Amino acid sequence: QLKDNVTQLREEMDHLQIEKEDAVQKESSKSKKENEHLKQSVATLRLQLESATGSKDEAVQRAIADGSKEIRQLRQNVSRLREELDKADFDKQQQVQNAIASQQNEINHFKRMVTALRSEIDQTGNLHEEKMQRETQLKTTEFKELQETIIELRAELEKTNGR
């Protein structure tokens, strides 16, 4: 009976050993499956991360390109507007110069007229005193009108020139 007990115990031990090995095998298999599943999850997450990073990088590159394009367009607009402003300023200066030249020509014309009238007055010095006085009075009046005109033209010129 002791032999039977030993045999029985040995069989139980063998059976327990087999169960233990089966359990270890099952746990090992379970761990391997879990490890594989975790590896797949890590690989999937890595791909998703790389995809997200790539999309983000592409978005950043697009934003940089769009910003650069907008800056280039703004610089072109600024340059074009500056050129237009310079041209408008030049045109205005040209108009002012033309107006000044025109006014100066007119003033010179009136100066020549005044000089001519003075000469004419001097030449009529030999005429009769009464005629001389009338002529002198007429010329003086005309001279005053010319002076007033010159004064008005000068005032207008100074007003035009912004003095």
Image: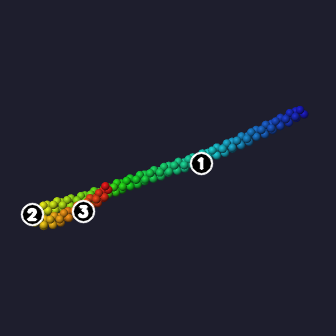
Give residue 149's mark.
3
Compare marks 1 and 2 and give the one earlier in the sequence.
Answer: 1
Mark 3 vs mark 1: in front? 3
Query: Is the C terminus in the top left, top right, bottom left or bottom right quadrant?
Result: bottom left
In the picture, residue 93 is in which quadrant? bottom left
- Residue depicted at x 29% and y 60%: 156
Image marks 3 and 2: residues in contact by CB distance under 8 Å: no
Q: Looking at the image, which is closer to me, 144 or 120?
A: 144
Residue 95 position, x and y percent, is 29, 58
Q: Amino acid at mark 2?
A: Asn
Does residue 71 appear to the left or right of 1 in the view shown?
left
Mark 2 lies on residue: 126
The one of 72 and 163 positioned closer to us in this rendering: 163
Looking at the picture, tell me which residue is in the foreground, 139 or 17. Answer: 139
Disc 3 packing (10 Å; few <14; some 14–19; many ≥20): some
Residue with the most extreme top position = 2
Q: Which residue ends up furthest to the left in the rendered image?
A: 126
| Amino acid at dot 1 | Gln
Q: Are marks 1 and 2 in contact (CB under 8 Å)?
A: no
Q: Position of residue 19 (x, y in %)?
A: 78, 40
Q: CA distance from mark 1 to mark 2?
A: 118 Å
